[in-house]
Amino acid sequence: MSGVNGDKARFNRRRRQKISRRQSTQKMLKSLAEKNLVAPALQTGHKEKA
């Protein structure tokens, strides 16, 4: 069956999975971006080994 013909349980489940996956990916990328923006400021006091 298709989503048009009324098999909404299956298609809505897939839709919810896609939405959830998108939200968790965006959350992860946002947290990684925030970590990478904050981390260099904290590392400026350390000397690099050459």
Image (cartoon, rainbow, N blue to C red):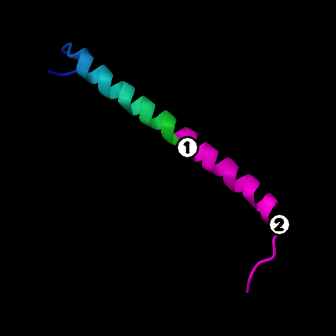
Label 1 vs 2, first from the N-terminus = 1
| Residue 50 image-quadrant placement | bottom right
What residue is at 74 percent from the left and 82 percent from the top? 49
Count up the numbered dots. Answer: 2
Q: Residues within 10 Å of mark 2 (few under 14, many from 20)?
A: few
Identify the element where label 1 is drawn: helix
Residue 3: x %, y % from top left? 24, 20
Residue in the foreground of this view, choosing between 17 and 49 = 49
Residue 35: x %, y % from top left? 68, 51
What residue is at 81 percent from the left and 59 percent from the top? 41
**Quadrant assignment for the N terminus:** top left
Q: Closer to us: mark 1 or mark 2?
A: 2
Query: Which residue extends farthest left?
Result: 1
Tag shown at residue 44: 2
What residue is at 32 percent from the left and 20 percent from the top? 12
Q: Residues within 10 Å of mark 1 (few under 14, many from 20)?
A: few
**Amino acid type, callout 2:** Thr
Residue 44 falls within the magenta-colored stretch: yes
Identify the element where label 2 is drawn: loop
* In the displayed structure image, the side of residue 1 where residue 40 appears, left or right: right
Residue 34: x %, y % from top left? 69, 48
The residue wearing badge 1 is: 28
Query: Which residue extends farthest right?
Result: 45
Above or below 7: residue 40 = below
Above or below 41: residue 6 = above
* In the displayed structure image, the side of residue 1 where residue 36 appears, left or right: right
Q: What's the magenta region?
A: 26-50
